[in-house]
Image (cartoon, helix red, strand yellow):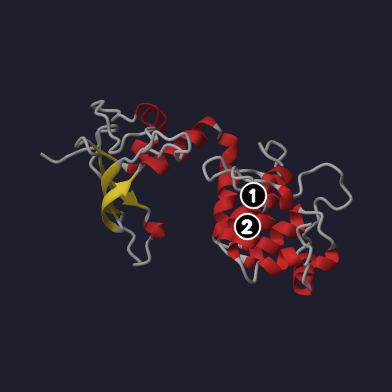
């Protein structure tokens, strides 16, 4: 008997929109979408994500209640008082989709993220912003900030979004993310928009691009607002600390006084 999704009971495939296809065909096409849990239950990817809050809290299959984690979640490997923090649970799945087969996909990080965002929907644009930052998508960063500025009902202001700490990524801010991904353009954009650094500290090319695009110095002449240079992650690191960890050429930013 053909397996179906335990949540929606439909076949383990999804239909692609013909408009998204590059082959010129107008007929709808289907691709596999089969997420097999350790207990043997099958789900569509999105159907399982819809159950994320329950799974993260119980670590059990929402269909058969089998315990799913393959490690001792929350247990430490040492009894020492200096033992490392408990490891996150690991839920290894077998996932088949359009891109192929992943025989050992740990689904827990995706479930934890979705559970958090379900409980904190205001964090969705901030998480999206951090993704753009990590990929160096400067134009996308600018557009997202513009959308936030133009939306009076946005859960976070642009200034708050620039300084937002990601609880799912060690409390890192967008500037932490940009530096660790070595996305130089994103780093300069974040410093221009979210810091009180002096204009003369910026390369002339950065100033010209900012002026050409009408990008404001959001904290210039403003007492309120958190300077992104001094936002600390959960390890107590500022962006300057990250620069020192990365070494050259990033240490030159600190030595030049940009982070003081």
Considering the image in quadrants, where does the N terminus appear? top left
Q: Residue at x 29, y 33 (%)?
A: 8
Secondary structure under badge 1?
A: loop
The x, y position of residue 100, in whole percent, is 27, 58
The picture quadrant where one finds residue 200 is: bottom right
Q: Position of residue 156 (x, y in %)?
A: 68, 39
Q: Residues within 10 Å of mark 1 (few under 14, many from 20)?
A: some
Secondary structure at numbered mark 2: helix
Tell me the CA gap for discs 2 and 1.
7 Å
Q: Are marks 2 and 1 in contact (CB under 8 Å)?
A: yes
For the point 34% across and 67% down, the residue is 23
Q: Which residue is labeled 1 in the image? A: 237
Q: From the viewer's perspective, is 56 left or right of 135?
A: left
Q: Does the rendering let one see residue 120? A: yes
Q: Nearer the viewer, residue 147 or 185?
A: 185
* Residue that extends furthest to the left in the rendered view of this protein: 1
Image location (x, y in percent) of residue 236:
64, 45
Is residue 139 visible to us here? no
Asked if residue 82 lies left or right of residue 122, the reply is left
In the rendered image, the vertical position of residue 229 relative to residue 225, given as above or below: below
Left-right relation of 73 to 185: left
Dot 2 crowding, Cα within 10 Å, few <14, some 14–19, many 20+: some
Q: Residue at x 72, y 66 (%)?
A: 253
Between 249 and 178, the one lying in front of the other is 249
Q: Is residue 95 above or below residue 74?
A: below
Question: Picture quarter containing residue 50?
Answer: top left
Q: Which residue is mark 2?
A: 242
How many marks the image carries: the answer is 2
The extreme front residue here reads 80
Residue 9: give x, y in percent of width and height: 24, 33
At 55% across and 58% down in the image, what residue appears?
A: 134
Quarter location, residue 241: bottom right
């Amino acid at each position: 008997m053909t397996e179906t999704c335990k949540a929606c009971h439909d076949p383990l495939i999804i239909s692609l929109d013909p408009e998204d296809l590059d082959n010129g065909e107008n007929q709808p096409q289907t691709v596999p979408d089969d997420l097999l849990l350790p207990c043997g239950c099958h789900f569509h990817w999105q159907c399982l994500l819809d159950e994320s809050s329950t799974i993260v809290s119980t670590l059990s299959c929402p269909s058969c209640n089998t315990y799913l984690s393959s490690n001792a979640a929350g247990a430490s490997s040492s009894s020492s008082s200096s033992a490392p923090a408990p490891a996150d649970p690991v839920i290894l799945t077998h996932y088949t989709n359009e891109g192929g087969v992943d025989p050992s996909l740990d689904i827990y990080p995706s479930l934890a993220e979705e559970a958090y965002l379900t409980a904190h929907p205001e964090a969705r644009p901030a998480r999206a912003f951090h993704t753009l930052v990590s990929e160096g998508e400067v134009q996308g960063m600018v557009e997202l900030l513009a959308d936030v500025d133009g939306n009076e009902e946005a859960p976070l202001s642009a200034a708050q979004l620039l300084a937002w700490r990601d609880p799912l990524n060690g409390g890192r801010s967008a500037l932490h993310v940009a530096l660790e991904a070595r996305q130089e353009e994103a780093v300069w954009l974040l410093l221009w928009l979210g810091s009180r650094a002096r204009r003369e500290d910026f390369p002339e090319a950065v100033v010209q691009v900012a002026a050409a695009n009408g990008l404001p110095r959001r904290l210039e002449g403003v007492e309120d607002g958190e300077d992104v240079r001094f936002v600390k992650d959960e390890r107590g690191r500022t962006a300057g600390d990250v620069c020192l960890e990365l070494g050259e050429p990033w240490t030159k930013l600190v030595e030049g006084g940009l982070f003081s």
